[in-house]
Amino acid sequence: MEEFLELSADTAEDDRILDRIKLLAQESLLVGWLNWKTLDLFKVTLFENKLNVDPEILNKLRFALPTVGLAQTFNPLSVDLPEKQYRDLKLHASPVFDSLKVNTHLEGLVSKSYNQKFLERADELTGSLTHGLLKQRQILMEGIKSLAAKHTGAYEDIKQMFLGESQFKEVSDDLLQFTCARRAEIIEMRRKALKPKEQQHVAKLSEIPPSQTHLFDIDLLSKFLDQRGGLSKIFSKVDDH
């Protein structure tokens, strides 16, 4: 598995995702996981004799990357998958220091109220905080890896202080989860402010996930509007109060 840490992706965005997966593996898997070997096996081959499964294989199968943690490598805003109605699609949300943009089709519907401007700024702030926390984790893991290479005998002490079930790790996880959850709530409030006239349209619009840059996926929103006769058939005039 050592080769895994040397892998690189074809694009900058995929590289960021890959870096998060590497970090998650370093935080979640057992000491020595870099020495594990990978094999391509079918399930029928692996478990054809249920009474005599290699205990070494069973031992490895006990350890997997946390589901939510793995989801967050693709989507840092994922906090609790069963509660996110757009959990299977990208909620990765936006460039690091920017809030999600209002889709071009919907710009004329956006209220100019203080509340909406505040939510937009809060979106930007929580996005920046989330990025900073993820970057901090990455730098910490790189530092731990460097220290462990220089002082092999100190790794267990370092792990107890900063990884696994350490107090530092618990506080770090809680802070990241809190920040991600708050941004998800803010994005949801911004989306709900764009409310169609009929309840059936409200439900369908809510099913359209955010894109990496906009409150709603651009292609899915266009399809939604086209299938229902256009913007004026779905939305009322905006209230600026």
Image (spheres, grey):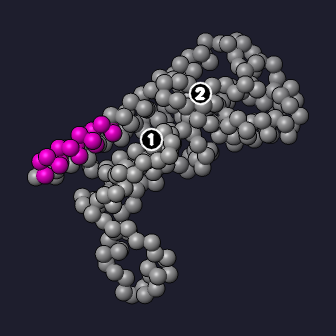
Q: Residue drawn 13% across and 46% down?
A: 150
Instruction: Please tell me whether residue 149 is drawn above or below residue 194 in the rendered image.
Output: below
| Front residue (pair 24, 36) | 36
* Relative side of 119 to 107, left or right: left
Q: Position of residue 85 (x, y in %)?
A: 62, 45
Q: Dot 2 lies on which element? A: loop
- Residue at 20% x, 44% y is 146
Residue 36, placed above or below residue 232:
below
Q: Which mark is residue 16?
A: 1
User: Pointer 2: residues within 10 angstroms few (<14), some, or many (20+)?
Assistant: many
Indicate which disc residue 100 carries.
2
Segment colored magenta: 137-152
Taking the image as shown, residue 227 lies to the left or right of residue 162, namely right
Residue at 28% in and 43% down = 141
Q: Is residue 25 above or below residue 195?
A: below
Q: Which quadrant is home to the N terminus?
A: bottom left
Residue 176 pos. (x, y %): 40, 36
Q: Secondary structure at mark 1?
A: helix
Nearest to the observer: residue 33 or residue 126: 33
Residue 147 inside the magenta-drawn segment: yes
Q: Is 73 displayed left or right of 1 in the figure? A: right
